Amino acid sequence: MNHQTTYDCIVIGGGITGSALAYELAKRKLKVLLLEKDQFINNATTCSYGGLPYQAGTNPEISSLFAQSIQIYRHLSEELEQNIEFRELDLLLTIDSTENPQEVAQQYSQCHELPELLSVDSACKLEPLLNPESISGALRLSHAHVNATRVNMAYQDAFKRLSGEIRYEKVTDLIRRANQIQGVITNTNKYYCSHTIISAGGLSRFILESIGITSKIYFTNCVVLKVPAQKKLRLNVMLMPATIKRFTLEAKMSQTDLLWQKLTPESQESIVDVGAVQFRDGSIYLGQTSHIISDPFANLDLDWSQKQIKAGIERLLPKFVDLPFTAQNCLVAFSGDPNRPMMGAIPLWSGIYLFSGFTKTILLAPVLARALAEQIST
Ligand SMILES: Cc1cc2nc3c(=O)[nH]c(=O)nc-3n(C[C@H](O)[C@H](O)[C@H](O)COP(=O)(O)OP(=O)(O)OC[C@H]3O[C@@H](n4cnc5c(N)ncnc54)[C@H](O)[C@@H]3O)c2cc1C
């Protein structure tokens, strides 16, 4: 079937970025098509802890965006008419027993709100499930939490109520005339539009490459263990390591464009950041490993990740070690400059925008979607 319908906007990708943006565009009375390749979504958003570290901004521009975003989140359930499970939930950044607490705390000295440095005893009072022997202290940060999958679904449902259209088709090419993008080609159709927005997470760079644009947007292949609802165990906080190896990995791997030019199925580097979060229904995510594999479709061996996460969890949260789980992997986009959101019109082109790969995506998606929708609609 060949659709000749013309839209104001086509958004590629139905994760949190694409869904939030599609909703904001439809709210501004634009005719919008959201294209998602998978009917049963398994993407970065469905693997996300859903943490909203709104006090962790390290410069005035980012802190102001975080403050605006948390304001939106506080009222988002009402706006979208669906419960997104928003709540205040402390973030406890665990400091490994091999690390010096004062030195680690120093890494957070630029944060908008200075995290509180807790002794081992105080950290274990706040979170009694912690193994005191695994840490030398912890940092407590005011923080909020949502169920990212629910936020995503709430945005999509609200978008449909505004007459937005969602189709489950894979975008395979962009329709171009000189340096203007006029629409997209999917596995089954061709659609025309004035504005095409790429929100395809880890696959965004490949859509851009299809028209010869090399961008500083990369991706990790991440693994999380999803534990079904637990009635007897209750985490009081969201847990992450204070020294997050993923950030160091991303910074390093965004320096070497060569690595990304050739699709390689082997992992160039893999790290584990031991963390945990429990959702309102009692289910738990234990994470996470991050792998640098330039081929997004490479078959990831989940065994290594399972062993690494389980070993870390056994040390940090011994009562969690025998919980049943399903391991899931996904691509997570990141950019060369975590402090500069990758969003907006693509220079030297018209009709095409990128909305992906920015830091603290779950927190920033609502506020940045509003800003980009405003830019496109005026
Ligand atoms: C374990 C884990 C924990 C995390 N915790 C946090 C956290 O606490 N806070 C936080 O802010 N972030 C967190 N993140 C990161 C965050 O989840 C992601 O950055 C965010 O969900 C990315 O959203 P997205 O819309 O950009 O991408 P995705 O959710 O991956 O969505 C992109 C969509 O595009 C679709 N797509 C791709 N190509 C095409 C195509 N050609 N045609 C049609 N559709 C296409 C894909 O199928 C996918 O559904 C975490 C990530 C992981 C893995």
Image: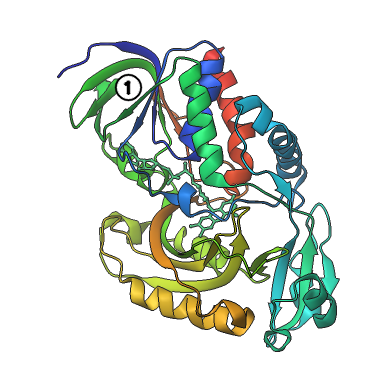
Q: Is residue 214 left or right of residue 116?
A: left
Point 52% across, 10% down: residue = 29
Label 1 Cα neighbours within 10 Å, binned few <14 / some 14-19 / many ≥20: many
Q: Residue furthest left?
A: 1
Q: How far from the left and from the top, in percent, is residue 108?
A: 76, 64
Point 40% across, 72% down: residue = 269
Point 33% across, 70% down: residue = 267
Q: How far from the left and from the top, in percent, is residue 28?
A: 56, 13
| Quarter of the figure with residue 105 | bottom right
17 or 128: which is nearer to us?
128
Image quadrant where one finds the N terminus: top left
Q: Is residue 278 left or right of residue 42?
A: right
Q: How far from the left and from the top, in percent, is residue 157?
A: 49, 27
Q: Amino acid at mark 1?
A: Ile
257 or 47: which is nearer to us?
47
209 or 189: which is nearer to us?
189
Q: Is residue 58 left or right of residue 309?
A: right
Residue hosting label 1: 181
* Mark 1 lies within 8 Å of ligand 1 (Cβ measured): no
| Quarter of the figure with residue 121 | bottom right
| Quarter of the figure with residue 117 | bottom right
Q: Is residue 7 above or below residue 315?
A: above
